[in-house]
Amino acid sequence: MLDYTTIRELVNQAQAQGVTIGRLALADQAEQCESPAQALVQRMRQDLEVMQAAARDGAERELRSTSGLTGGDAWRMRDYLARGGALCGPVGARAVAIALAVAEYNAAMGRIVAAPTAGSCGILPGAVLALLEQGLADADAAVDGLFCAGAVGMVIANRASISGAEGGCQAECGSASAMAAAALVQMRGGSPEMVENAVAIAIKNQLGLVCDPVAGLVEVPCIKRNAGGVTNALTAADMALAGIRSVIPADEVIQAMREVGESIPCSLRETAQGGLAATPTGKRIREQLFGRPV
Amino acid sequence: MDIFDIIGPVMIGPSSSHTAGAVRIGRVAAEILGEPVRIARIGLCGSFAQTYRGHGTDKALVAGILGFAPDDARIRDSLNLARKAGLDFSFEPRSLPGAHPNTAVLELWGKDGAHCQVQGASVGGGNILISHINEMETCVTGERDTLIVLHRDVPGMIAAVTGRVADSGVNIGNFRLSRPHKGAEAVMTIETDAAVDPALLDTLRAVPGILRIVPIPANNTL
């Protein structure tokens, strides 16, 4: 059985067995949960379907969040993409549009899959569904990619954190970005070692990202950070697939993420007291929505 | 932790603690009441009090009281659905020194006259902690199958309940008893290694001195 405390363990075991990290994790989870593998695959397929529905319904032009602060940006991105010439190409622009749609749908009390959290729920679907839609992978590869992402997320949860209140946004959007990068590499046929490098690169590029939600809501800057997170995942995956290696190994990067997270001041860990939440505009929005703090 | 704790849960946004956890608190409170809710007076503390409208915590709590699951799309519209169902509900900010920042206190009255007060906190990732039932201290997380037993504080109650649980072949992993005064109402919270049989619940309900038996199934289902 796997203990999900190092990425290295996942890579070594996958290489030894000649399987993907996704397959490895599926077999292990079936054993640990005492459940047939097919049932877990079915459940992951349902999660994928929830992601697809959120990507579709979150891109409505009139969508607004409960606070009224956000909504409609996924529609804008999709509209822009349809006109052609998006700078980050069809896959990248579509990934951004999906990440925005799912994150905006979450803010509008839509049904989503926390991956690993609700605040970062757009990143993994953005990556996986963009590849599916663009014909660069099939649904089986997508499900396998989600198992790979889940295994990576478990290691991060065990060794660092996936909670913004504990580790800042790097723990939420950073973790989601690493998970998405892992899924992307695997879906494109990359080796377990390439997955490891993609995870390391993705986290390195988000290291130290603070959690500073305006008015304490999962909207500003969370939604756009989902778009940033998926773009970072695509960049990390492309680098890893090109054979670029991370100088610092993934497990050491995750350890650094933990230490950085612990040293982020409380005001920048989901308390809405610092960073963007404490800007004049951020404070004004808070007052408009909830009145003056008592 | 399993892989679906990372890729999941499927939930209604925007926040696992302010929305999904709040649904679960409402649902457990309604289970404790044990009959359709007529009146709900809901006190909100800390972050819940500050941001409940923006996060939909009010909708989530009422949805839970109506028995909805955390991934039920009707949560968005729960306040209207509750009004249509004749539920009289209200919210007010409340100060509870020392309480977790995401705490709600639900006072519920049922259609057949039952009454209960439940204090719960949403402690992150959709996980909850029910810290008080009828002002008696409890520690119900719902991470394991749990039996909440409200009963009169008279001799032999613990033996009567745990003996019957043991006879059914279910192992008790954790047990806690709380009572405000000698001889008044008391509450047992019993975590078991497996779900208890519905037949056992009926047996327990027939024990003299038992007021309410509330089974809370382990995490994923409530």
Image: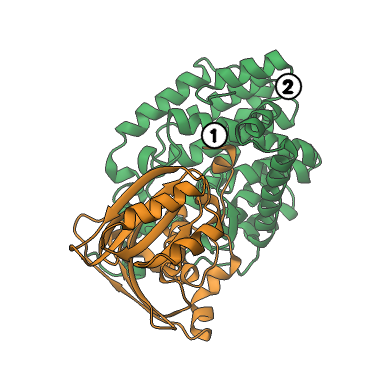
Residue type highlighted by circle 2: Val
Percent across and percent down for residue A171 are 45, 37
Mark 2 crowd level (few <14, some 14–19, many ≥20, 10 Å Cα): some
Name the tint of chain B in the rendering.
orange
* Subunit bearing disc 1: A
Could you tell which of marks 1 and 2 lies nearer the N-terminus? Answer: 2
Percent across and percent down for residue A110 are 58, 62
Percent across and percent down for residue A230 are 59, 40
- At horizontal 36% and vertical 40% (from top left) the residue drawn is A166
* Subunit bearing disc 2: A
On residue A153, which mark appears? 1
Residue that carries the numbered disc 2 in the rendered image: A19
On residue B107, which mark appears? none
Q: Is residue A13 left or right of residue A64?
A: right
Q: Is residue A191 left or right of residue A156?
A: right
Towards the viewer: A49 or B165:
B165
